[in-house]
């Protein structure tokens, strides 16, 4: 008997296997762009996520009518009922991807289908409507084409793309929403951290706060995962650290950083050079940059590449035995970011990332940047224009 079993017991991966019954079509896209154009900002002075382009993609859905016709229209405030489920119960999700203006002048998206896959998994887990991933990707490509002059003429900046799906059920009942809005907004961005690109950051690791847990939604890109982390992030900053390193379990397993997946490059317990990152066990977000780093490292074939559990005891032991070479975060916003210190149980652990080059982190940064900005040909990119 099925009874009250959780349809999503296996997390976002299981939820994504449920079929999509209908979708909007890119061929039906209606384009009514803004006639009032804002001045483009200086790419050298961008603060992450504070400036937005002139237009947005907007698509409504209802249980009775399905998906409406997709529209590209002037960026505007949303008009929603004060009881919508996104506001009261965090029935919403988002994605993060970028468009890059290459050295050849072409605009590229980086592995966008991985973002579409993850967004559809998140939608299923949040009981929000499914959609055809290729149709949404085509709509996003068209939006970027319309806003192509907003893609910075710079190889140190990019156009951040924020697809968002929110439940707009005008009811205080805790239930699957009967209405939703999918929209995409764009923002030209520079480095995510105020310290600049590829500058080392400090982390705070404390087991008293937990980001995610088995059976939860840690492997989906839901806003609630981020909103509930802000309190710990504030405490980290008060202690002089820039980000939270989230731990899990009594053995203080390393999971991920606030906006990044985490990697260690070390000589492991068996004396092997190894690139290691925590496994996708339901509490780790399956990052696009994470997957790309794993793919590159396996293609290089120069050292062991592992998705494995790593505890803080493993880390401190490696530090004492001088086996740890580099630690770095990876994500769409920051690409690759070295880690220099970790504040753990009142002790500042010095991570020798910068003393070791950092050779591996720099190599990943360079190759990913070369692909994104068109210096290296790759089937990971889609040319928009």
Image (tube, rainbow, N blue to C red):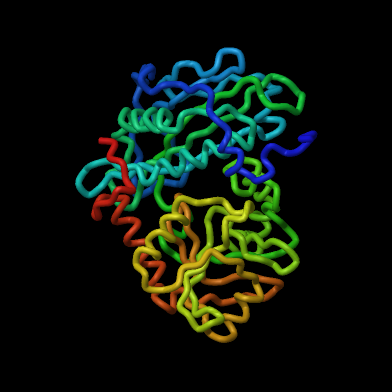
Residue 182 in the image: above or below residue 332: above
Q: Which residue is at 70% across, 73% downward?
A: 346
Residue 140 in the image: above or below residue 327: above
Residue sitting farthest toward the top: 65
Residue 278 in the image: above or below residue 268: above
Q: Which residue is at 75% across, 28% downward?
A: 174
Instruction: Find residue 289 and report its image quarter.
Output: bottom left
Instruction: Find residue 335 and report its image quarter.
Output: bottom left
Q: Which residue is at 55% across, 20% downward?
A: 61
Task: Give coordinates of residue 309: x percent, y percent.
Answer: 61, 66
Residue sitting farthest toward the front: 1
Image-based side of 182 in relation to 97, left or right: right
Image-based side of 334 in relation to 181, left or right: left
Task: Give coordinates of residue 257: x percent, y percent.
Answer: 58, 58
Number of marks drawn? 0
Q: For the N terminus, which image quadrant?
A: top right
Instruction: Find residue 317 and report its image quarter.
Output: bottom right
Q: Which residue is at 53% across, 64% downward?
A: 307
Task: Give coordinates of residue 282: x percent, y percent.
Answer: 63, 51
Residue sitting farthest toward the bottom: 321
Residue 337 in the image: above or below residue 173: below
Task: Give coordinates of residue 66: x percent, y percent.
Answer: 55, 17
Q: Which residue is nearer to you in this view: 317 or 27?
A: 27
Q: For the C terminus, which image quadrant?
A: top left
Q: Which residue is nearer to you in this view: 268 or 258?
A: 268
């Amino acid at each position: 008997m099925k009874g009250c079993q959780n349809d999503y017991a296996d997390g976002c991966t299981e939820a994504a296997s449920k079929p999509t019954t209908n979708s909007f079509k890119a061929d039906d896209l209606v384009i009514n762009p803004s006639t009032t154009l804002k001045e483009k900002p200086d790419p050298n002075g961008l603060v992450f996520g504070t400036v937005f382009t002139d237009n947005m993609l907007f698509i409504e859905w209802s249980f009775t009518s399905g998906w409406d016709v997709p529209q590209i229209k002037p960026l505007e405030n949303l008009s929603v009922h004060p009881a919508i489920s996104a506001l009261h119960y965090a029935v919403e999700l988002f994605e993060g991807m970028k468009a890059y203006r290459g050295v050849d002048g072409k605009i590229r998206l980086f592995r966008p289908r991985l973002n579409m896959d993850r967004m559809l998994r998140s939608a299923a887990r949040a009981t929000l409507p499914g959609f055809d991933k290729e149709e949404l990707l085509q709509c996003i490509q068209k939006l970027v084409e319309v806003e192509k002059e907003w893609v910075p003429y710079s190889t140190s900046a990019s156009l951040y793309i924020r697809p968002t799906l929110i439940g707009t059920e005008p009811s205080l009942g805790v239930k699957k929403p009967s209405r939703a809005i999918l929209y995409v907004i764009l923002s030209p961005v520079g480095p995510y951290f105020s310290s600049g690109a590829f500058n080392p950051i400090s982390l705070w690791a404390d087991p008293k706060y937990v980001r995610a847990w088995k059976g939860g939604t840690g492997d989906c890109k839901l806003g609630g995962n981020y909103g509930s982390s802000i309190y710990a992030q504030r405490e980290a900053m008060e202690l002089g650290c820039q980000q939270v390193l989230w731990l899990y379990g009594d053995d203080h397993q390393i999971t991920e950083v606030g906006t990044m997946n985490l990697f260690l490059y070390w000589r492991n317990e068996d004396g092997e050079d190894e690139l290691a990152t925590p496994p996708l066990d339901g509490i780790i977000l399956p990052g696009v940059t994470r997957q790309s780093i794993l793919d590159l490292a396996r293609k290089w074939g120069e050292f062991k590449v592992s998705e494995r559990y790593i505890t803080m005891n493993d880390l401190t032991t490696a530090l004492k035995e001088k086996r740890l070479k580099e630690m770095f975060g990876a994500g769409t916003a920051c690409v690759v970011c070295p880690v220099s210190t970790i504040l753990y149980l009142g002790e500042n652990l010095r991570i020798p990332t910068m003393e070791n080059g950092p050779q591996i982190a720099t190599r990943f940064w360079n190759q990913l940047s070369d692909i994104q900005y068109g210096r290296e040909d790759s089937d990971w990119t889609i040319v928009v224009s």
